[in-house]
Image: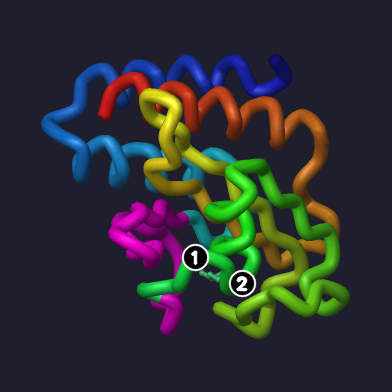
Amino acid sequence: MKYQKQFDELRELVLANKGPEDIESRVVISLHKNFTNYNWVGIYRLEGQHLVLGAFQGKPTVHTRIPVGTGVCGSAAQSQKTEVVPNVEADARYLACSLETRSEIVVPIIKGGAFWGEIDIDSDAPDAFKKDDVEFLEAVARLIAERL
Ligand code: SME
């Protein structure tokens, strides 16, 4: 994996956690700090038919509760598959969080076979999320799911 060093740091942080909210905050802080292209990093949890924002790094967003099926976040909750949006302006589903955002990735967190929540990352750079990012972030999502 390309980002093995960053993954190893995350694993140490997650293993030392003090509970689920602490895991969320350790993960978003580490991702935001280690990747200059990851301008906004947040974790949404599924509560009923809504995604509810937990820990995040970056500017505050109005999208703190997103219905399943709405936006890129809600689509990933429905499909339970990673969504990569290379150009947010070209995606009709996109809910704007910041005017600077150009691309986005949403990675589901599947715990015990069920959708638990997702990692959402926005970048100010166009097409910021490549195969290496998908591979790394899906490994991070599995790490979180094992420890929640
Ligand atoms: N862009 C997301 C909304 C969340 S904000 O990016 C923080 C979406 O389209 O679902």
> Disc 1 residue type?
Val
State which image quarter holds ligand 1: bottom right
Give x and y (percent) for residue 16.
21, 20
Q: Residue at x 71, y 67 (%)?
A: 124
> Is 88 situated above or below 107?
below
> Is 61 situated above or below 5?
below
CA–CA distance between discs 2 and 1?
Answer: 8 Å
Where does label 2 land, which residue? 71
Q: Residue at x 20, y 38 (%)?
A: 20
Horizontal relation, residue 67 to residue 126: left or right = left
Magenta span covers which residues? 42-63
| Element type where label 2 sits in the image | helix
Give x and y (percent) for residue 1.
70, 15
> 22 or 110: nearer the eye?
110
Q: Residues within 10 Å of mark 1 (few under 14, many from 20)?
A: some
Magenta span contains residue 44? yes
Where does label 1 land, which residue? 68
Give x and y (percent) for residue 138.
59, 30
Q: Quadrant of residue 22?
A: top left
- Give residue 13's mark: none
Give x and y (percent) for residue 67.
46, 72
Q: Taken as a whole, is the magenta stretch helix, strand or loop?
A: strand
Q: Quadrant of residue 143?
A: top left
